[in-house]
Amino acid sequence: MSPRRHGFSAPRHGTSTLRASIPIQCGILTTDSAAIPAYPLPLGLSPPRPLYPITQPPGIMRSTFRLLAGVKPARYLEPFAPTGLTGLVTHPSPRPTLIFLYKSTLDKLKAFPESSVYRQSTEALTRHRLQIVESTKPPGFDAWLERVKKAVAEEPERFASLRRPDGTYAAWQRDDGSDNPRGQEWDGESIEPTTEGPARTAEEEARWHQAIEDSTKPTAESDFHTSQMKWENEPALEAEQIAEIERQIGAGLIEEVIEVAEGELKVVDELYRTSAWEELSEKPRPGQWSYFERKTE
């Protein structure tokens, strides 16, 4: 199991601190002469008062176990929070990301010959993982999908450039800052008069007039649409759903699965560029690869 599933953060190398959200009581070993702490104390601190004799620790241990048993895991994973693996943070939207990567890989594999062993094996694995991810839908997914379809139907021309061959839509998203009430305020920058530059060439002048003419055509309904659009994100998967996807795929955390999918997509591009399925330009000598063959008696 991943450290993040239990609410603990794994310590970094070079430190000896393990932080947990549950207070754990430490016992004190008692003898006839004095109380001896069962853990090293920092300099300048005196040993605390004995809590219980060494012969009676079960009571306090049972109390601690009850506290640990009462901890409930979070319903959702916090985006960009540490995963317990160095340099890997919690992905904010793993499901749509994996679907996009897997479908892109399958589309590019269609350019490979059907006889390619790499295509056959990669397609089988990618389709299997895609089915696992697509079959897991977050709560509220159907209602969100209806709202999205309605938004696309109202302005189809705005989404035409984002439409993929399989009928889905994909684009880069970023925070528009609209949640900041002071984000749209004037930042104090003044508008300075522009200096006179070199005269436009005939080609630049023609492009300028063409742009003005195109922008004033009454037939263009979307001329005055802004290039940026507000989009409602897909509902997030619950932590249990992510854990189930990780269990079915069996390749580590879902963030690790995303990194593997990104790498596979790059491999497909490189193999297609080099036409790896073609015959070697220099034929191997007879018996060159016989050493690596599995021999059966």
Image (cartoon, rainbow, N blue to C red):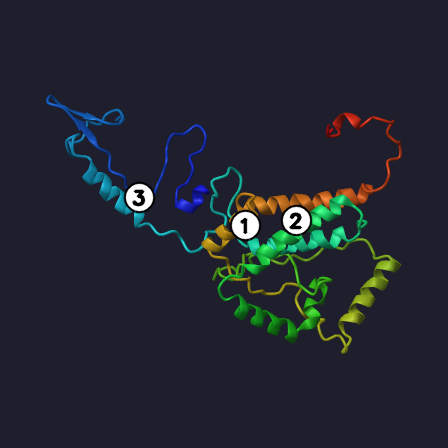
**Residue furthest front in the image:** 297
Q: Image height check: is 268 above or below 200?
A: above
**Residue furthest left in the image:** 32
Q: Residues within 10 Å of mark 3 (few under 14, many from 20)?
A: few
Task: Tell me the kind of residue under disc 3.
Answer: Ile
Tell me which corner region of the image, top left, top right, bottom left or bottom right, holds residue 176.
bottom right
Question: Where does residue 224 sit, x and y in percent of width and height?
Answer: 69, 71
Q: Is residue 161 left or right of residue 206?
A: left
Tell me which corner region of the image, top left, top right, bottom left or bottom right, holds residue 221.
bottom right
Q: Nearer the viewer, mark 3 or mark 1?
A: 1
The residue lying at 80 percent from left, 48 percent from top is 115
Q: Is residue 84 left or right of residue 170?
A: left
Q: Secondary structure at mark 1?
A: helix
CB under 8 Å between discs 3 and 2: no
Q: Earlier along the polypeptide chain: callout 3 or callout 2? A: 3
The residue lying at 30 percent from left, 50 percent from top is 70
Is residue 174 in sight in this rendering? no
**Residue furthest top in the image:** 33
Is residue 273 in sight in this rendering? yes
Question: Where does residue 283 sit, x and y in percent of width and height?
Answer: 88, 31
| Most foreground residue, 120 or 258 | 120
The residue lying at 66 percent from left, 43 percent from top is 263
Q: Earlier along the polypeptide chain: callout 1 or callout 2? A: 2
Query: To which residue does mark 2 refer?
Result: 125
Question: Where does residue 203 sit, x and y in percent of width and height?
Answer: 87, 59
Query: To which residue does mark 1 refer?
Result: 248
Q: Residues within 10 Å of mark 1 (few under 14, many from 20)?
A: few
Query: To which residue does mark 3 refer?
Result: 22
Report the Cα–Cα distance between label 3 and label 2.
41 Å
